Image: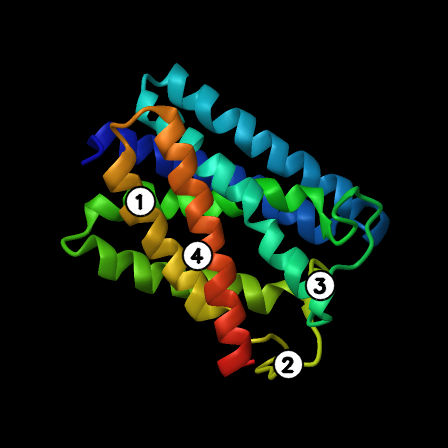
Amino acid sequence: MPSSTGLRDALIFHGAFFALAIPLALNASSDALGWTVLLLALAYNIALPLVGHWRQHEDWAALWRFLLPLSCALPCADWMLVNQGTLHFPDHGITRLGGAVPLYFCGLWIMLLWQLCWFAPVFKRPYWAVALLGLAAFLVWEWAARPMQLWEAIGVRQVAGFAPYPLIPEMLLSLGSLWMWKQLKTQPWLPQLAGALSLAVFYAGALSLALLWIG
């Protein structure tokens, strides 16, 4: 269970970061959006462990080290969808993984997953909380992605301008991240890396099945 100071500092850090990041991303021109998001992703991943160390919350960095390889691997699932012709990322002039997914996505997944895993112990039923909060958070991002020109679904069932089929895999990813962290947080880095990468494979499989059955 995180300390009250750790919870308070995490709320302040994320509140301040997103109070700055969201207006910057929303007001960036199309030509500048890619670099803006890339710099924000880098800033988050540099600032989070540094602020945690400064505030003497070494467990911030521990969770960050576990989730960063997962965050870097998850765009491979989007790469698969791009190759299948069901997902499109607008060109903002940023290097792409496999020529498909803008590189900054490697640093974006962790922004949500870290918060879900960190704040989960606050709730009496953490897995229920992470499932519901993860579903709600990813719903907002899926809905906001097209107007923000981050990505768009192609040739699949859509509701209010977004595709609903990724939501269940994303909820399962949230649950899996919390479960894997609880199992491996006291283990050396190599088993944590293996666990994180296995989650990325699990998510890609869940996404493929959701596309088949729902999309």
CA gap, disc 2 and disc 3: 13 Å
Which amino acid type is shown beneath numbered disc 4? Phe
Left or right relative to 65: residue 128: left
Residue 71 coordinates in the image, percent (x, y): 52, 43
Disc on res. 190: none
Q: Secondary structure at mark 1?
A: helix
Whether residue 164 is visible:
no
Q: Who's the residue at 60% across and 48% down the image?
A: 22
Q: Which mark is residue 202?
A: 4
Label 1 crowd (10 A; few <14 / some 14-19 / many >=20): some
Tell me if residue 152 comes above or below residue 183 in the rendering.
below
Q: How many other residues sit within 10 Å of disc 4, few (<14), some (14-19) or many (≥20)?
A: some
**What secondary structure is marked by label 3?**
helix
Give whichever of discs 1 and 4 has the lower sequence position. 1
Mark 3 or mark 1: which comes first in sequence? 3
Question: Which dot marks residue 156?
Answer: 2
Front position in the image: 31 or 189: 189
Distance from disc 4 to disc 2, alpha carbons, whole Å, reads 22 Å
| Real-space Cα separation, disc 1 to disc 4, in angstroms | 12 Å
Left or right side of 11 for 104: right
Tell me the residue at 58%/75% (across/down).
Answer: 163
Q: Which residue is mark 3?
A: 82
Quadrant where the image shows the C terminus: bottom right
